Image: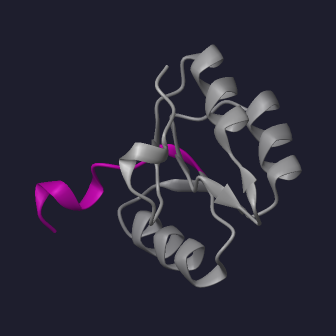
Amino acid sequence: MSDCDNKLNGCRILIVEDEYFLANDLEVALKSHGASIIGPFGDFDAAYRRAARDHFDVAIIDINLHNKAAYPIADELIRQGVPFVFYTGYGGEIIPER
């Protein structure tokens, strides 16, 4: 194994993605590098509840969850100081400035 193979070892990652195959591919890839996956969650309400009550090292969030914007989930993570990235097919211009 190379040194970069286990950089995510023990890292708790929340995945919020409503497309099954994308969520599954992401989960498999991250687990192969040692990450502990929470989710994936494709439902806004379930994802928000989980984000509000659990601690994560980082989150990966799709912006559009069945036509509902996931920005409140990102806002909750900001409130907690949890870093995240948006995982989306949309361009950066749709992300509100804050």
Q: Nearer the viewer, residue 1 or 74?
A: 74
Seen from this angle, which residue lies furthest left? 2
- At which x and y percent is residue 11? 46, 43
Seen from this angle, which residue lies furthest front? 93
Q: How many marks?
A: 0
Q: Nearer the viewer, residue 57 or 63?
A: 63
- At which x and y percent is residue 20? 66, 80
* Residue beneath the point at 53% across and 69% down: 27
* Residue beneath the point at 60% across and 35% down: 56
* Residue beneath the point at 63% across and 63% down: 17
* Residue beneath the point at 70% across and 48% down: 69
Whether residue 77 is situated above or below residue 4 in the rendered picture: above
What span is in magenta?
1-14
Whether residue 52 is situated above or below residue 64 in the rendered picture: above
- At which x and y percent is residue 53? 81, 29
- At which x and y percent is residue 44? 81, 52
Is 80 left or right of 95, judged from the image as shown?
right
* Viewer can see residue 59: yes
Q: Nearer the viewer, residue 94 or 61?
A: 94
Is 2 left or right of 98, judged from the image as shown?
left
Seen from this angle, which residue lies furthest bottom? 21
